[in-house]
Image (cartoon, grey):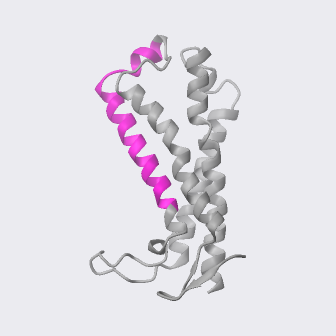
Amino acid sequence: MASQFSSSNARIVAPRWAVWAAWATVLCTVPSCVWRLLLGFGADVGFTGRLGSLYTGTPIMVYVLILSVASQAAACLTLGLVKPWGERVPGWVPRLGGRRIPPLVVVIPAAVGAVAVMGLCAAVTLVPNGPLEHPDFPHGTAGVIMDICYAPLLAWGPLVAVLTIAYARRRRSR
């Protein structure tokens, strides 16, 4: 394992592959966020019928904005599995700054998040007659574009799972 000790704070630095994987989790959510935001701001992304009329207006715009910000924020939290702020509370945080974060406080939510994302992706993509087979969902070119934008999410959960295991091992080895 290519872990190193950092002399400034005596912590084990995450291996390069883990840093790349953490950034990949952030990038996995970007295409679907862009696609959703286009939907929310009124672009025709291929929904027809009842769904086409349902997915318009201010309520859907607010929904996709909140969902996109939340998914990007969750993906960015994955960086805490490879960065110092995932091991110690940043110094600027009042009263808690500089305190060590117990590993389980990070590992448990990260593991639950990984399982939840994998479960959600499996439910949407693998369930027979699931939402993707709905007749009002985008088909043809619009469906292919939607699939391309959502496909990277299939890697999100497994990446978080692998990073969570690496984080737990690194923190335990200390």
Vertical side of 170 occupied by 23: above or below: above
Is 45 left or right of 25, judged from the image as shown? left
Q: Nearer the viewer, residue 141 or 64?
A: 141
Residue 83 in the image, given as x and y percentages of width and height: 50, 70
Query: Is residue 40 rendered to the left or right of residue 25?
Result: left
- Residue 104 falls in which quadrant of the image? bottom right
Q: Percent x, y for residue 134?
A: 59, 19
Image coords of residue 136 (percent x, y) = 54, 15
Q: In this view of the protein, can residue 139 be seen by the observer?
A: no
Residue 131 position in % (x across, y down): 59, 26
Q: Main secondary structure of the magenta part?
A: helix
Residue 67 magenta-highlighted? yes
Considering depth in this image, is 10 or 157 the residue closer to the camera?
10
Quadrant where the image shows the C terminus: bottom right
Q: Of 37 and 57, which appears nearest the observer?
A: 37
Residue shown at 40%/21% (left/top)?
A: 43
Q: Is 95 placed above or below 140 here?
A: below
Could one spot residue 121 in this view of the protein?
Answer: yes
Q: Quadrant of the N terminus?
A: bottom right
Q: Quadrant of residue 57?
A: top left
Please identify the residue farthest to the left as the structure is shown. Answer: 94
Magenta span: 50-78
Q: Is residue 167 magenta?
A: no
Q: Residue at x 63, y 46 (%)?
A: 119
Q: Which residue sits at x=47%, y=75%?
A: 84
Question: How many numbered marks are there?
Answer: 0
Residue at 61 percent across and 29 percent down: it is: 147
Q: Residue furthest top?
A: 49
